[in-house]
Amino acid sequence: MSGHSKWHNIQATKNKMDAQRGKIFTKIGREIAVAVKLGGGDPNTNSRLYDVIAKAKQNNMPNDNIQRSIKKAMGETSAQNYDAITYEGYGPHGVAFIVECLTDNRNRTAADVRHLFDKFGGSLGTTGSVTFMFNHQTVIVLAKENLAEDDVMMVALDNGADDIQTEEDSFVVFAAPDKLHALSKAFEEAGMKVASSEVVYVATNTSLMEGAAAESIQKLIDALEDLDDVQEVYTNAEFAE
């Protein structure tokens, strides 16, 4: 259940904006607002909120910020309604893009995303024009530390995992999207440190990009991620190391 390079592809093409901590917190705050609106403010009874809080902690979001976001979402009477929208298209050099957004203004977001695709030599496509090239999966990364592969595999398989990839300093677990909560909680209860856990798009086949081509694709990724409404950007580009 190992040997795939698909996690490297995600790491290479999905910039988490580590240097832009404030933007990350803003994006996670929107996810918290959506989770609270859908299932209430108690993570013990709202699995979606539980998972978003776990993501917030993995990104070093202070607990005060998390609680403030929850209280704000619970206290809003005329709350902002965020819609989840996924855009598909092709960037420069025919690279496939999936862009996940949470927005309170669909027209603004559509215009902003379309503008950037046009600016960098790409084009937006229709629903389904790109997603067939990706698998929608739960991906959980566990810090290796003192963990035994057999122990990780046992917890993973008992809770619905499909695949496990062994890296130099981590184990990467793949599963169906609806297994995120059960797997994350199982690892936590087993005392295994979860470095990151989320549902992502994993390209089934990648295109190797180098030099100027890689640079132009990275510029589009960076520009999209800089938009407040954009939560995640995925491509099937693989960048040469």
Image (spheres, rainbow, N blue to C red):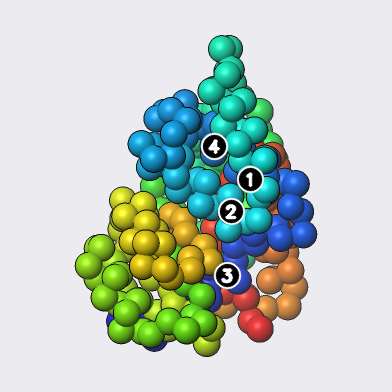
User: Disc 2 versus disc 1: distance between alpha carbons?
Assistant: 8 Å
Toward the viewer: 190 or 134? 190
- Residue occupied by mark 3: 11
- Return the disc, 4 or 3, that comes first in the chain's sequence: 3
Between marks 2 and 3, how big is the CA–CA gap?
19 Å
Sequence order check, earlier mark of 4 and 2: 4
> Residue 89 location in percent, x, y?
53, 50
Q: Amino acid at mark 1?
A: Asn
Badge 2 element: helix
Three-letter amino acid code of the residue under disc 2: Lys
Q: Secondary structure at mark 4?
A: helix
Mark 4 and mark 3: Cα distance apart in space: 24 Å
Q: Position of residue 237 (x, y in %)?
A: 56, 69
Residue at which label 4 appears:
32
Amino acid type, callout 4: Ile
Q: Amino acid at mark 3?
A: Gln
Find disc 1 in the rendering and name its residue.
63
Q: Is residue 98 visible?
A: no
